[in-house]
Amino acid sequence: MIDLRSDTVTRPTPGMLKAMADAEVGDDVFGEDPTVLRLQARVAELLGMEDALFVPSGTMGNQIGIRLHCRGGDEFLCEQNAHVFQYEQAAFAQLFGICAQIVPTPDGLLTPELLEDRVRPDNDHAPRTRLVCLENTHNRKGGRTLPQAGVERVCEWAQQQGLARHLDGARFWNACVAAGNSPAELVAPFDTVSVCFSKGLGAPVGSAICGPKELIREARRVRKALGGGWRQAGVLAAAALYALDHHYDRLADDHAHAQLLAAAVRESPGLSLVDGSCDTNLVILEVDPVHASGADFHRRLTEAGVGCFQIGKQRIRLVTHLDLTAEQVAEAAEIIGQLAG
């Protein structure tokens, strides 16, 4: 199968496996794993933030980020298709008594104009609005890279309102490569950010929550409460460090491969790209219901050997990653055209 379901399906490369096998380890719950400490320092430096905490997953990173800024009875604002709302099981409500207020947008980017009437008045009848969450790249908008000028504008507005800012950076490294900005430049407007190592970078496990030292000290406590305290985690931290050293620049290859798939979609009858764009390594196509049902086209793609996800009644997601060759991507593009023709 040409597996385009997600960039989480990758397997560690031989070099990464060697780095994991050679990792110096200790007990991270005691703060004694040297490889974890090295990863946390490296990520904090990359992002221009004071500190970072290695966590098992992006969902945990985001939920810790929300909890750092909100308490029970508080709410945060996010885009209606945001991953923290759509795909994280409302963990903020289950675990912390926090609610979300979702905001529709045309392009995935919140703006002051969309938010100015969403901040609750300070009275006993309403939850307290505490936080604005953004997502870069935006998953359900086809891996869209948020324009930095717009991000800075909404974060500046939020700061003026006394609201904290958290970035879901599940595919943040893709955003940096696509936009040509340094990681520190893209996260400068935020208080906290969660970044992932197990998507585009190809590590087997792990994310990091980054921010000021006092917040990351609190993040460690929340991680423990969530069952995220791990012991000799340096084996996994070594994979993340290897990924940062060897798999960052090659994200541009994934983006180029996604453009081949996007071109096939544009040229195929009955198919279109969601929002007409493909910024990074995600391609979301929409099947014209007159042409076929989304379920039928998904089935035919799968039977033809192209692994993919149906993410809506007529929408299918394809994701490029480091385990794919250029020949496999070209073959998948050809299959898309043949099945749509």
Image (cartoon, rainbow, N blue to C red):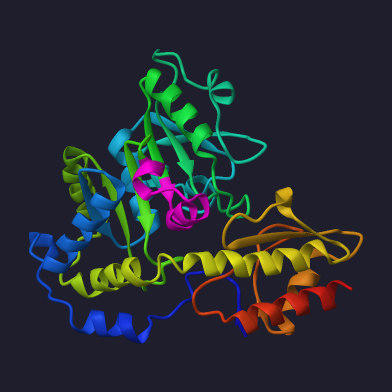
Residue 285 visible in image: yes
Q: Position of residue 77 (x, y in %)?
A: 48, 32
Residue 71 visible in image: no
Q: Is residue 150 above or below residue 319?
A: above
Depth check: give the residue in front, 57 or 186: 186
Number of marks in picture:
0
Is residue 62 left or right of 79 when viewed as pictured?
A: left
Is residue 272 left or right of 257 when viewed as pictured?
A: right
Name, please, the residue furthest toward the front.
Answer: 180
Q: Is residue 179 above or below residue 130?
A: below
Q: Residue at x 59, y 45 (%)?
A: 81
Is residue 78 left or right of 50 when viewed as pictured?
A: right
- For the N terminus, the image quarter is bottom right
The image quadrant of residue 302 is bottom right
Depth check: give the residue in front, 258 or 208: 258
Depth check: give the residue in front, 225 or 179: 179
Depth check: give the residue in front, 28 or 112: 112
- For the C terminus, the image quarter is bottom right
Q: Which residues are magenta?
A: 168-187
Q: Residue at x 30, y 55 (%)?
A: 208
Q: Position of residue 145 (x, y in %)?
A: 55, 48
Q: Main secondary structure of the magenta part?
A: helix
Residue 176 highlighted magenta (yes or no):
yes
Q: Position of residue 114 (x, y in %)?
A: 59, 25
The image quadrant of residue 129 is top left
Q: Residue at x 36, y 72 (%)?
A: 246
